[in-house]
Amino acid sequence: MTVPRLAIDLFAERFGDALKLDQPLAKYTSARVGGKAEMVLTVKSADDLLAAVEMAYAHSIPYRMIGGGSNVLIADAGMRGLVILNRAKKVSFRNRGFSVVVSAEAGMNLSSLSRQCISNGLGGLEWAIGVPGTVGGAVVNNAGAHGSSMSDCLVTADIWVPGEGVRLYHNDELEYAYRNSLLKHEDGFVVISADLTLKLEAAAVLNARAQAFQTHRKETQPSGATLGSIFKNPENYYAGYLIEAAGLKGYRIGGVEVSTKHANWFVSDESATAEDVRLLLAEVWHAVFATFGIKLEPEIELVGDWHFEMESQTQSDEEQM
């Protein structure tokens, strides 16, 4: 353990059975790969989330949020410090003229929130039906689908800033771009909650739209253990098309293969490791670059304690990217 025993005792005193030590992380990720964490803490309220990050910061303990566990690849060697499983999911609604503001804590499942809004006749989040992850992850990554994204409906977000506390960020301060935001480049920032503005629409219309999105998703995206989209779409291209055109559909390394249904998705079996995924990612990147001269940008993030050999290779890959 790299976390001092005193700090562990303080967390145990504050959070009780919600704190677990030396816990496997694979079951908390959509790809079902990755090693253990020294400390895993499940929080179910914004107050507990704030207390956890403030305690970790005060004791210089590295911390990492995991919501839905998509778009993140955890090293087989695991992670040092504290992993926070955010399950804070309080939701409230308030009228504002012809629209409604939805306030959601960061641990709320994004797809579940979409369904709840649809049932209340609130339009603007139907694109999130079936999208894995949580509100917090969607705010950070500017998640989106079917031509819409989080930046289209986000008004403000309460964000904990290391050394400062909670600060209210407005949409235009978050520097949103395609699958990107200011928050992706700020270490230690934690989304606590978000306010979204949605419009009143007939529930029947919203349900029909959502059903069409779901049908399209089932027809075009694989099921099973996946990380979601592996690469961002480069300008004027679809990453899946480039990967398929490079002849990599069905290409396999270890327990992971490029999906035969959608080439920008990797599917893992029970034998898969995080290193299998990383190696396949690098192989696909190089094949597309060699074929088209296009440098794909990963949409997933590698976190945790990668071995020195892996780190060296990853750095080499990134330099070539």
Image (cartoon, helix red, strand yellow):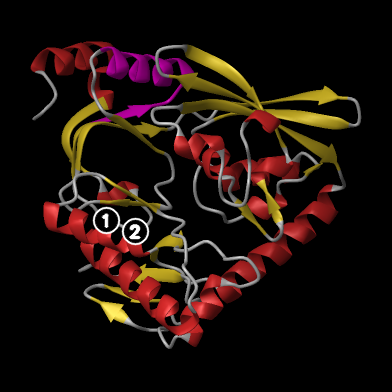
The answer to whether the residues at label 1 and label 2 have Cβ atoms under 8 Å apart is yes
The residue at the far right in this view is 98
For residue 200, the mark is: none
SS class, disc 2: helix
CA distance for labels 1 and 2: 5 Å
Q: Residue at x 63, y 51 (%)?
A: 128
Snapshot quadrant of residue 135: top right
Instruction: Give how far across and how far down residue 142 sits, in percent.
Output: 59, 45
Q: Is residue 71 visible?
A: yes
**Label 2 belongs to which residue?**
318
Snapshot quadrant of residue 84: top left
SS class, disc 1: helix
Amino acid on which the number 1 mark rests in the picture: Gln
Instruction: Give how far across and how far down residue 157 sits, in percent.
Output: 61, 26
Left or right of residue 2, residue 64 in this image: right
Please check the rendered image and state whether residue 145 is part of the magenta-colored stretch, yes or no: no
Instruction: Give how far across and how far down residue 165 sits, in percent.
Output: 47, 12
**Label 1 belongs to which residue?**
315
Left or right of residue 93, residue 143 in this image: left
Density class for disc 1 (Cα within 10 Å; few <14, some 14-19, many ≥20) is few
User: In the picture shown, does residue 265 fall above or below 103?
Assistant: below
Instruction: Give how far across and how far down residue 82 sits, in percent.
Output: 25, 29
The boundaries of the magenta stretch are 40-58
Density class for disc 2 (Cα within 10 Å; few <14, some 14-19, many ≥20) is few
